[in-house]
């Protein structure tokens, strides 16, 4: 792809947009970055763009900015815009940042998407590849923009690029063709952006769009929704987990039926039953990408949970406090309850935030089975209360995270788990899911031991 002296407009000046702008500038393009932010809000990032010769058009999205563009690159956080539709009608190509990067990468790519678990699986696969001696880049939706991998240490034929991909990032891909593509699951999420679950699933399915018959699609056994997303004449299909999965749980071990490799589940560092399936997916994808059995084994023994993803914070008075602030949708909250709670180990659930348009019925069903109580907060609190009213557990509404943690402690009994799994996004009260998790952890660590003034 030759961008020399071509005008490229990058819409959105988040981390992905900034990385895309620098990549295009290195390739000789005349780059304009367009964002609603101000120069003061961009700060040093805007100054670096200007020093790289990038033109900044800030404070508005307007057709004149795109008038003579040869290519438009859209950051994943930018919602659908009429001006972009108009540009496409004129025949100008509009792509996303990951698609841009894919057109320049030389290294084989492993792509992971899904509603839940993709960060954990991406991290595991990346670690497995690196332990196998391959120069490895790990990023995408996980944190570092894919464009940063281009021309980097791992961008070589014997390297490996492992990338987490969100539905937003996959909306505008055309030639992105992972050597190994993984979809872990599809459950309702982002229905404030997509008109239906089917539309959301189609965006996820774009990960397989450009794959060929020599590539690999890794999908969960028995999941009809995900399996239907693999093109009939596309990549080789591989199933994980379930009775017919190539990599699955068998007794007290993980088994790769294709190679005979086994791993004792007692040695798995990841917390929660839901992470057993995540481990199965990672093992299968890493093996297909060329990871060694020894490297796969060492990763499973070494890689624990990621921050704010089923992260154990503290055990106090026989109660385990777990931060799963990354559970920003109902499916993720249900998965956390599935993995961490049971009728014998009940959960006091802390939930709430900004509603994302899905149903809370699956959460109500699981709370009825394994819940001790639910503490709700944020904008979605009334919706969650109504949905969980018939679950048969106490429901309390609070105004702050500190209050939520105090009430959860009062409601919990020895042997229970207090679980932050909000089922909502965080932006009503917090900067991000990570900020929300940090506040939860600080409140938990501030709880006094019995006899230090807390009589809950």
Image (tube, rainbow, N blue to C red):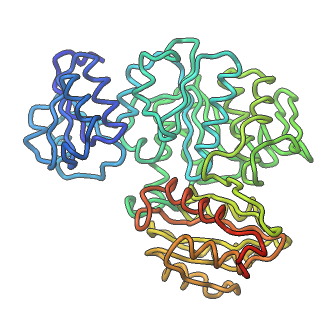
Q: Which residue is at the far front?
A: 452
Q: Which residue corresponds to the image point at 66% horizontal and 61% vertical from the top-left? A: 445
Which quarter of the image is occupied by the C terminus?
bottom right
Q: Which residue corresponds to the image point at 40% horizontal and 67% vertical from the top-left? A: 428
| Residue 441: image location, x then y, percent | 61, 59
- In the rendered structure, the answer to whether residue 146 lies left or right of residue 338 reads left
Among the 4 quarters of the image, the one containing residue 265: top right
322 to 415, vertically: above or below: above
Of 275 and 280, the residue lying toward us: 275
Q: Which residue corresponds to the image point at 38% horizontal and 23% vertical from the top-left? A: 103
Of 12 and 209, the residue lying toward us: 12
358 to 171, vertically: above or below: below
Which quarter of the image is occupied by the N terminus?
top left
Q: Which residue is at the far right?
A: 251
| Residue 105: image location, x then y, percent | 44, 20
Of 139 and 417, the residue lying toward us: 417
């Amino acid at each position: 792809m030759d961008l020399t002296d071509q005008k490229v407009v990058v819409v959105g000046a988040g981390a992905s947009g900034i990385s895309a702008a620098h990549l295009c500038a290195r390739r000789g393009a005349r780059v304009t970055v367009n964002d609603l932010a101000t120069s003061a809000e961009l700060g040093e990032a805007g100054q670096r763009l200007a020093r790289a010769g990038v033109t900044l058009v800030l404070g508005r999205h307007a057709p004149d900015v795109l008038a003579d563009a040869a290519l438009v690159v859209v950051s994943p956080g930018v919602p659908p815009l009429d001006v972009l539709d108009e540009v496409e009608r004129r025949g100008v190509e509009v792509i996303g940042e990951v698609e841009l990067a894919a057109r320049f990468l030389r290294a084989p790519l492993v792509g992971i998407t899904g509603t839940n678990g993709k960060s954990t699986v991406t991290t595991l696969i990346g670690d497995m590849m690196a332990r196998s001696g391959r120069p490895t880049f790990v990023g995408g939706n996980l944190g570092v923009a894919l464009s940063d991998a281009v021309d980097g240490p791992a961008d070589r034929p014997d390297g490996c690029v492992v990338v987490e991909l969100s539905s937003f990032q996959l909306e505008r891909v055309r030639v992105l063709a992972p050597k190994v593509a993984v979809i872990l699951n599809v459950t309702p999420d982002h229905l404030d952006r997509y008109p239906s679950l089917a539309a959301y699933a189609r965006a996820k399915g774009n990960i397989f769009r450009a794959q060929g018959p020599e590539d690999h699609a890794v999908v969960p056994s028995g999941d009809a929704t995900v399996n239907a997303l693999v093109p009939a004449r596309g990549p080789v299909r591989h199933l994980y987990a379930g009775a017919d999965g190539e990599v699955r749980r068998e007794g007290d071990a993980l088994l790769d039926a294709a190679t005979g490799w086994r791993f004792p589940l007692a040695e798995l560092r990841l917390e929660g039953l839901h992470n057993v399936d995540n481990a199965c997916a990672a093992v299968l994808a890493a093996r297909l990408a060329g990871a060694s059995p020894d490297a796969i084994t060492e990763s499973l023994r070494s890689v624990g949970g990621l921050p704010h993803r089923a992260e154990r914070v503290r055990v106090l008075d026989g109660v385990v406090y777990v931060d799963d602030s990354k559970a920003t949708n109902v499916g993720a909250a249900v998965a956390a309850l599935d993995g961490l709670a049971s009728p014998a180990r009940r959960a006091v659930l802390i939930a709430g935030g900004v509603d994302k348009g899905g149903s809370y019925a699956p959460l109500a069903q699981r709370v009825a089975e394994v819940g001790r109580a639910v503490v709700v907060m944020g904008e979605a609190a009334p919706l969650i209360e109504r949905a969980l009213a018939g679950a048969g557990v106490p429901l309390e509404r609070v105004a702050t995270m500190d209050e939520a943690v105090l009430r959860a402690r009062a409601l919990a009994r020895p042997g229970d788990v207090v679980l932050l799994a909000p089922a909502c996004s965080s932006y009503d009260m917090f900067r991000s899911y990570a900020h929300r998790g940090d506040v939860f952890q600080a409140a938990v660590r501030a709880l006094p031991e019995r006899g230090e003034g807390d009589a809950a």
